[in-house]
Amino acid sequence: MAESENGAASPQMPQMKVLGQFIRDMSFENILARKPVSGQVQPDVQVQVALDGRKGAADNQYEVISKFNITSKNKGSDDVLFVMELEYGALYHIENIADEQLHPFLMIECPRMVFPFVRRIVSDVTRDGGFPPLNLDNIDFVQLYRQQLLQKQQEKAAAEGATQPN
């Protein structure tokens, strides 16, 4: 902590730098090209997002991976039109974040910062795959983080309940 003019310690501002971004894994399958759908096509797109973060090799470095599963089905028949999977990662240098705030910061702020790049990749790949460009809606990473915490708590409670003797 830095000292201010009156001698009191003042907290340092959090700092985050994106050191690099990368596609870890990506696949796009145009199912419509090999199995045409009859009648009117009305796409129904479903997007699932998962996040994973871990400490990097160097001090204050962290890697966060955003995993996207995107499925487009025809509303009337539920025929799958395309499937896209994307794992997009970024390496960050982060300083001045309290330990209890680090995990939410990694799972909320880091993916939020690189989401425009993910949106562009999804748009380009769907367009190049023969479909209208898919522009992903903004993702509420705070809500996503809360959902993942709740799911982990429920899984932990279920596991503890299963191991308890009757």
Image (spheres, rainbow, N blue to C red):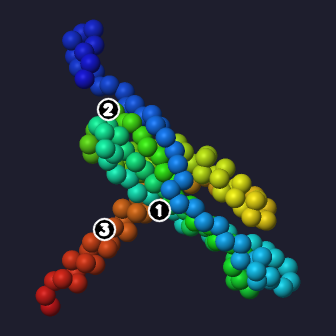
Instruction: Classify residue 19 as left or right of residue 34.
Output: left
Task: Name the residue at 45% across, 34% down.
Answer: 17
Q: Which mark is residue 153?
A: 3
Cα separation, mark 1 vs mark 3, equals 16 Å
- Can residue 107 be seen in the rendering of this structure? yes
Determine which residue is flagged by label 2. Answer: 96
Q: Nearer the viewer, mark 3 or mark 2?
A: 2
Residue farthest along the right direction in this orientation: 39
Asked where in the image residue 136 lies, by quadrant, the reply is: bottom right
Task: Name the residue at 60% across, 51% down.
Answer: 118
Asked where in the image residue 14 lies, by quadrant, the reply is: top left
Q: Earlier in the sequence, mark 2 or mark 1?
A: 1
Q: Give the residue type at disc 1.
A: Ala
In the image, residue 103 sits, relative to residue 83, either above or below, namely above
- Can residue 101 be seen in the rendering of this structure? no
Q: Which mark is residue 50?
A: 1
Q: Earlier in the sequence, mark 1 or mark 3?
A: 1
Instruction: Classify residue 71 as left or right of residue 158.
Output: right
Cα separation, mark 2 vs mark 1, equals 26 Å
Q: Give the residue type at disc 3.
A: Gln
Cα separation, mark 3 vs mark 2, equals 28 Å
Q: Earlier in the sequence, mark 3 or mark 2?
A: 2
Residue farthest along the bottom direction in this orientation: 166
Instruction: Classify residue 134 as left or right of residue 37.
Output: left
Quadrant of the image containing the C terminus: bottom left
Q: Position of residue 79 (x, y in %)?
A: 71, 83
